[in-house]
Image (cartoon, coloured by chain):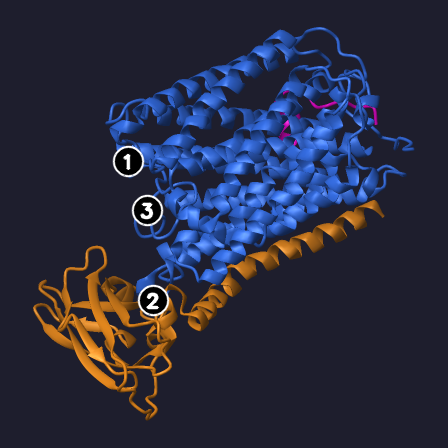
Chain colours: A blue, B orange
């Protein structure tokens, strides 16, 4: 058993080791994060002033589309899968993932999917330009020829996600150390278990909707074509039936990470563990019955509007349970504010703001005003950037010493945090105001009165981008060397992953640990 | 033992994924169509209606407005012969739309109806409509497209005006490329 990894590149191509695969997922996601970030900066640079300065509208549309697709499918989702690969076996006392070969495959098809997606930028007619939600008929009749590559890229990354999810469920259900009952699992394992079920339920729906597009474009069907008896609104229903659970796929694992970090730095056990589990499950269930709140304006019967409005508002209840539990965990704790904790606390505050703007959007009659404005952009960036990105960042800082055996540079971590925190709020907070004032989303040019807030947002975006360079530098430096990290790393970190040496050996828990 | 447990659960989950794919492609679209037909959602009107003799409700008059528009690059001229008519519920009404193909090629068009308010959709019956079929017009040819309808006497009293709009699509290429594959089964969409 005492063999190490293969030498050279074969280690990475042939590996079935969960830690290697987790590392590859995380680096891949980091690369995609910078690529998608650069696209966001092109968008913000163009929007710095009214009028067209830097890019043409056609290219601007490609940027908004690719930024969304790359961030959702290339940055956030693989980062969570990477964290799951690294941490889940160590958290539940398993020697590896349940299906290691499939694990290798599910990672290695991802670079191909994104190579295909990004290559569309260099094709005649340009990259997909119909927004990341790719509504038909924009994405069918009016799409550039590269749409076919986009469709196959979605197929591949969907397959990757489904395989990853199957692997995670099999690992959690079959590979737990003796004594690790479901209700003793760390919340990260719980939230990922539920997320994996969401993935298996909705990624095929995404594959289905792009397949229907493919049929409409190339094989003469009319799923979304009114001339042939189809209906473009059907596209929106199918898409959002996938799309709404998808946004919870991007946030539930974040809840797990935050639930690990807050107790460590508050030096108190997590408040309300079982209510956290039930809240996560309720959010997952509700995510299936609220999809039409994304499309209040398509023309729905009043009963439909009311149902989707109330169901959406209901989600605030389990989410509120979570927020209160985290706050109660911190209440009268001996808190310290190392970098992971800073990101975790910022997560709670900013995610709550995003949740509140979500409640505003949930009000069907008000949504007619907010629909397709920058208010929506502000809302979902407030839940995804402090929600998904901050929690991933917090998780990376939290577990980096365990992965590398070195402490990261705390000062640089704090600089990263404050730059990112200020940059994020500068970027996205003004978007609420321009949105309420009526600035539509996905436009390269805008009316003069929105100029001030847009300039603030653009400055903030570049600040946020600079912060991520600090992050990259800090991570690379920590990988190269630094102060040795102890086994427990943090003062009071609980969980099996803190019982193995730092850095975690190539094989951990070859014999199952004893769980009290 | 370990192996077989993992295989079992993988097979189950894979089956779940496969069934969701089937659900998305083969169940959701018909479900949506059925839902729209029942509720009149999206202004979809019903198919061909067999007229049943009904008492004409002469106590009220309903205004029916006609709109015609062309989709995308459809070059035909397409317009209703009258912009609106007043009918008594239960009364059978005839009108025509005028279509003309000014191009120098033979073309096929398909008109897709939509009706507002949505709640009136189920009370608006078409016994004869050009939209049940595709329209083939030779180069330079024009035609009167007939529409015969009756407004149901059960139409809710709050509805005084019904707007019926047709969008004309160019389906020449679709039809010539895929004579059988199109989802156009004329009566379904009426």
The residue that disc 1 covers is: A58
Where A354 falls versus B88 (above or below)? Answer: above
Labels in figure, total: 3
The residue that disc 2 covers is: B117
Measured Cα–Cα span from mark 1 to mark 2:
37 Å
Main secondary-structure element of the magenta-colored stretch: loop
Q: Any magenta on residue B164?
A: no
Residue A121 location in percent, x, y? 36, 33
Residue B78 location in percent, x, y? 15, 66
Q: Nearer the viewer, mark 3 or mark 2?
A: 2
Quadrant in which residue A161 is drawn: top right
Secondary structure under tag 2 reads: loop
Q: Chain of mark 3?
A: A
Measured Cα–Cα span from mark 3 to mark 2:
32 Å
Tell me which segment is drawn in magenta.
A1-16
Residue A476 location in percent, x, y? 60, 13
The answer to whether residue B126 is visible is yes
Q: Nearer the viewer, mark 3 or mark 1?
A: 1
């Amino acid at each position: 058993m005492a063999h190490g990894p293969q030498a050279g590149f074969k280690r990475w191509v042939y590996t079935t080791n969960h830690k290697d695969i987790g590392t590859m997922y995380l680096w891949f996601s980091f690369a995609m994060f910078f690529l998608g970030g650069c696209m966001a900066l092109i968008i913000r640079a163009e929007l710095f002033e009214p009028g067209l300065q830097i890019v043409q509208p056609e290219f601007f549309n490609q940027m908004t589309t690719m930024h969304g697709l790359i961030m959702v499918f290339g940055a956030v989702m693989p980062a969570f899968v990477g964290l799951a690969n690294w941490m889940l076996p160590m958290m539940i006392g398993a020697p590896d993932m349940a299906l290691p070969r499939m694990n290798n495959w599910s990672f290695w098809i991802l670079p191909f999917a994104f190579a295909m997606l990004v290559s569309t930028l260099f094709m005649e007619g340009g990259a997909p330009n119909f927004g990341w939600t790719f509504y038909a008929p924009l994405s069918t009749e009016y799409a550039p020829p590269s749409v076919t590559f986009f469709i196959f890229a979605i197929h591949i990354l969907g397959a990757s996600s489904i395989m990853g999810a199957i692997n995670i469920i099999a690992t959690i259900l079959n590979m737990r150390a003796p004594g690790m009952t479901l209700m003793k699992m760390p919340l990260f394992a719980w939230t990922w278990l539920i997320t994996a079920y969401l993935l298996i339920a909705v990624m095929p729906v995404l594959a289905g909707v792009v397949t229907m597009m493919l049929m409409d474009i190339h094989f003469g069907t009319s799923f979304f074509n009114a001339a042939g008896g189809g209906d473009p609104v059907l596209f929106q229903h199918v898409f959002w039936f996938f799309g709404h659970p998808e946004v919870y796929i991007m946030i539930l694992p974040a809840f797990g990470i935050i639930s690990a970090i807050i107790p460590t730095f508050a030096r108190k056990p997590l408040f309300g563990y079982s209510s956290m589990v039930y809240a996560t499950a309720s959010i997952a269930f509700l995510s299936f019955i609220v999809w039409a709140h994304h499309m209040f304006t398509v023309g729905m019967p009043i009963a439909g509007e009311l149902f989707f409005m109330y169901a959406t508002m209901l989600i605030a209840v389990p989410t509120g349970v979570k927020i209160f539990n985290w706050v109660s965990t911190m209440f009268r704790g001996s808190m310290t504010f190392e970098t992971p904790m800073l990101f975790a606390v910022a997560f709670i505050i900013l995610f709550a703001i995003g949740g509140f703007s979500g409640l505003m959007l949930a009000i069907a009659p008000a949504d007619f005003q907010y629909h397709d404005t920058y208010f929506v952009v502000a809302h979902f960036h407030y839940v995804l950037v402090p929600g998904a990105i901050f929690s991933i960042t917090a998780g990376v800082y939290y577990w980096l010493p365990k992965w590398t055996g070195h402490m990261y540079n705390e000062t640089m971590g704090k600089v990263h945090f404050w730059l990112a925190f200020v940059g994020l709020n500068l970027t996205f907070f003004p978007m609420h105001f321009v949105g309420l004032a009526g600035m539509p989303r996905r436009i390269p040019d805008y009316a003069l009165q929105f100029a001030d807030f847009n300039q603030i947002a653009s400055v903030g975006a570049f600040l946020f981008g600079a912060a991520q360079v600090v992050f990259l530098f800090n991570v690379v430096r920590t990988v190269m060397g630094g102060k040795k990290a102890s086994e427990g790393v943090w003062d009071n970190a609980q969980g099996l992953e803190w019982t193995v040496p730092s850095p975690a050996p190539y094989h951990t828990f070859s014999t199952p640990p004893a769980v009290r | 033992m370990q192996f077989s447990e993992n295989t079992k659960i993988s097979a189950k989950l894979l089956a779940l994924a496969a069934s969701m794919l089937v659900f998305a492609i083969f169940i959701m679209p018909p479900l949506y169509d059925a839902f729209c037909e029942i509720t009149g959602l999206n202004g979809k009107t019903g198919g061909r209606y067999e007229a049943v003799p009904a008492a004409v409700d002469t106590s009220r008059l309903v205004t029916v407005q006609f709109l015609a528009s062309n989709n995308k690059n459809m070059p035909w001229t397409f317009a209703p012969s009258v912009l609106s008519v007043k009918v008594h519920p239960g009364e059978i009404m005839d009108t025509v739309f005028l279509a003309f193909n000014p191009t120098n090629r033979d073309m096929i068009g398909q008109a897709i109806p939509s009706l507002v308010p949505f709640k009136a959709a189920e009370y608006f019956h078409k016994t004869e409509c050009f939209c049940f079929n595709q329209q083939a017009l030779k180069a330079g040819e024009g035609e009167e497209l007939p529409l015969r309808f009756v407004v149901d006497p059960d139409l809710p009293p709050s509805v005084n005006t019904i707007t019926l709009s047709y969008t004309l699509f160019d389906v020449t290429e679709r039809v010539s490329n895929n004579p059988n594959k199109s989802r156009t089964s004329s009566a379904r969409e009426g």
